[in-house]
Amino acid sequence: MRWLEDQELWEIKLNHMAPGAGDLSETQRQERIGESGLDSVQIWQETVRAKIVASAVGGLVEPRAWPANVPGKESFEGDIFHSARWDHKVELAGKDVIVVGTGCSAAQFVPKLTKSPFNAKSVTQIMRSPPWVAPRPVAPFGQEMWEKWSPRVFSAMPWLAWLLRLVIFIGAERDFNLFGGEEYHAQFRSKVEKELSDHMRKSVPAKYHEILSPDYPVGCKRRIFDATWFPGLNDPRIELTTLPLTSIQPRGVTLGPGRTYPDMEKVDSSAPKHEVKLDADAIILANGFDTTTWLHPLKVKGRNDQYLHDVWTARGGPQAYLGAAMDGFPNFFIVFGPNTATGHSSVIVASENMVNYNLKFMRLILNGDASTCEVKKEAETRWTKNVQEKLKKTVWNAGCQSWYINDGWNSTVYPYSQIDFTLRCMFPKWGDWNIKYTRKGMLKLRLRQILGYFGLIAAMAGLLWARRSGVAFGSMFAMLRQTISRAFVQGRGVALRRSS
C-alpha cells in the first residue's frame, strides 16, 4: 500500500486468496507459488483507496520456518507441520511424534497427544532451554462448576464480570515487579523463583529436575501458566530432552551428540549428551513465530516513497510512537504495534487501550474535522529512545535468549506498567501530533479554546471578587455545599409534589 500525498489517501492492493490459502503462512504461500504458480494462492487483485488504514495483524502471526541447520527435511516420509498451522488431516494414532519446542503452545497440546482423539504411540519433546512455569490459577468453585455457571451468572449480572476483570487486572499488575532492575525487584524475583522451583519439583519426575531448572531470572523469557504440561511429563509415553535435533532420516530423526541445556561446560551435569536415533512418523514444530519483523509481509510506502521497514532499519529497529503511529505515514494506525506487549498483563487490555487511543484521531478524520493526523518525528524518536533506554535496565536484558529481542533491539515489550499505558492512551499528548484541521474542525477547535478562556477568566474573576469581599476559601466551599444542599432539597420537594 502507498500514500498518495496529493489526494491525502492510502492506495491499497488487496489480494483475494484461493480457498484455504489464507490459512497458510507466508512461507507456505511462497512455496506453493513456486510449485504450482500464483493462481494456486491468489485469485485476483483489487485496488481500493481509503482515508485511514489501521493495521491489526498482531504479533504472533508468521510461524518460524524449519531450522536451517537441520538437514534431511526433504527426505522425511512422514508429516511435518507447525502447531500454529495444524494439519487436521494428519492421523497421529499409533504414531511416533517429535515435537520441537517447549513454549506456551507446546505446553498446551503436548499432554493431549497421547490421549483421545490423537492417541500417539510416543511423544519426544525437544527443549532448547527451560521456561519458568507457574501453576495456572484455579477457577472459583472448580473448573467444572465455573464452566457451567459463570456464563449464566455474568449474563444476569454483567457488572460482576467487570468487577472480576478488574480484580484480575490489579492482581496481574503486581507481577510487574518481576521486570525491574532495582534491588527490591531482584528480591521479589528470588521469592517467585523459589515458589516456581518448588512447584516444578513437586510436579515432574526427578529425572527432569535439572533440565527444568532455568539459569536466568524469571521474567526474562515469557512465562508459562500451566495446568497440564508438568503433570503430563509423568506419562511414560512422553519424553522431554535437551538433546539437539541434528538430522532427519526418511522414517526417523537423530538427536545429539551434545545438549542445548545445561551448558556442555557444566561437567557435573547428568543431562544426556550422547547421540540417539529415534523412529518418527510426524514432526510438529512449536518453535514460535517471527515476532521481530512486525507487519510482515505488508509493504507500507509512506511520504517521500519511504517504506516503513526501511525507516525502521535506518532507525535501529521496529518502533512506533506508543506502538500506534510513525511519522511519515499519516492516517496510518497500528493496533498492538512494537513495544506494546507486557510480560505480566493481558494483550486484550493493551489492544483495547490502543483501539481507544487510535479512535481519538480517527474520529477527527471521520467527522470531517481533520484531513490528516501524523505523529511528529521528534516525538516518535524521543519516545523510542526513552523506551529502549528503560528496557536496558530491566530483566529482559539479563542475558537469556528470547523472542523479545533481535540483535540487541527489543521491539516487543513495554517497559512500564499497564496502568501507565492505559493512562497514556486515555489522555493523548496532542502536542506530539501534527493535525491538519479542516475549516470545520478549526472552527470547533477555536470555539473550544474561546470557551476555555472564558471559563478561566470567570474562575479568576470569581476568586478576585471573593478576595476583595473578604470571603475565605473555606467559607466559599461552605456556601457552595449549602447551595447544593438547598437545591437538592428543593428539587426533591418538587419531585415529591409532582409525584403526589
Image (tube, grey):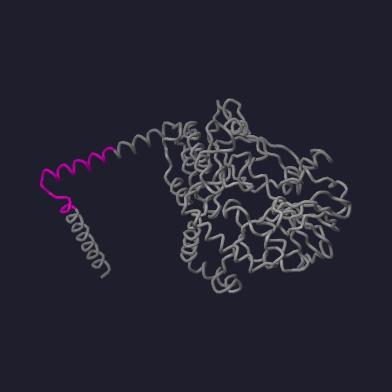
Q: Position of residue 482 (x, y in %)?
A: 18, 58
Q: Position of residue 46 (x, y in %)?
A: 69, 37
Q: Position of residue 245 (x, y in %)?
A: 79, 51
Q: Main secondary structure of the magenta part?
A: helix
* Residue in view at x 47 percent, y 42 percent: 363
- Residue range corresponding to the magenta coloring: 453-476
* Residue in view at x 58 percent, y 28 percent: 4
Residue in the foreground of this view, choosing between 20 and 295:
295
Residue ranking furthest to the front: 267
Q: In this image, 488 relative to 43: left or right?
A: left
Q: Quadrant of the C terminus?
A: bottom left
Q: Is residue 450 at all visible to an observer of this figure? A: yes
Q: Position of residue 1 (x, y in %)?
A: 63, 34
From this view, report whether residue 291 is shown above or below residue 197.
above
Write down the quadrant of residue 12 in the picture.
Answer: top right
Q: Is residue 30 magenta?
A: no
Write down the quadrant of residue 488 in the picture.
Answer: bottom left
Q: Is residue 373 at all visible to an observer of this figure? A: no
* Residue in view at x 66 percent, y 47 percent: 61
From this view, report whether residue 328 is shown above or below residue 405.
above
* Residue in view at x 67 percent, y 44 percent: 290
Residue in the foreground of this view, choosing between 414 and 35:
414
Count numbered badges in the picture.
0
